[in-house]
Amino acid sequence: MENYKLVMPEDLNHHGFLFGGRMLQWVDEYAYIAASLDFPRCNLVTVALDHVEFRRSVLQGTVLKFQVQQARVGTSSVQYTVNVFNANEDDSQSIFSTGVTYVRVDDDGTKVPLPTADGS
């Protein structure tokens, strides 16, 4: 799945670069969208982000491309790989990448199994 985001002035830190927390927000949001499409009607919560390293700075006006792919499915959890690129540059150099893991919970917050391919 691909999503795009325009970096606006309100997304910048005090040095004029993209605020890291904003990038993490978008990564979590887009990975959640992919998870909720793959597992509709499941209550999914973020439990982990893998290694966090910002490889390049991002300026206002940059169009970011987020590529989200399902990486692993467990009994109650699912992990997505998220790669972020400058949409106007060569895709071989990512700005940021990480894995985001979600777990399915019931209404009480207890882990429950994800549905299987047959819907159970």
Image (cartoon, rainbow, N blue to C red):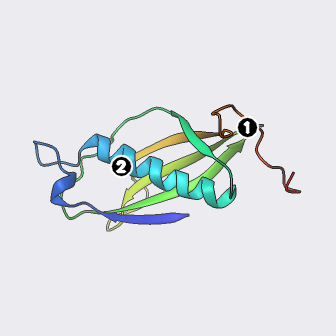
Query: Residue 66: x percent and y percent?
Result: 44, 58
Give the mark nearest the N terminus, 1 or 2: 1
Residue 94 can be seen in this image: no
Residue pictured at 43% horizontal, 49% vertical: 27
Residue pictured at 35% horizontal, 49% vertical: 95
Q: Which mark is residue 43?
A: none
**Callout count:** 2
Q: Nearer the viewer, residue 106 or 64?
A: 106
Query: Residue 56: x percent and y percent?
Result: 28, 46
Q: Which structural element holds mark 2?
A: loop
Q: Nearer the viewer, residue 94 or 114?
A: 114
| Residue occupied by mark 1 | 76
| Residue occupied by mark 2 | 95
Q: Quadrant of the N terminus?
A: bottom right
Which image quadrant is residue 86 in? bottom left
Q: What amino acid is at disc 1?
A: Ser
Query: Residue 63: x percent and y percent?
Result: 30, 65
Q: What amino acid is at disc 2?
A: Ile
Q: Is residue 57 left or right of residue 64?
A: left
For discs 1 and 2, the disc positioned in front in the rendered view: 1
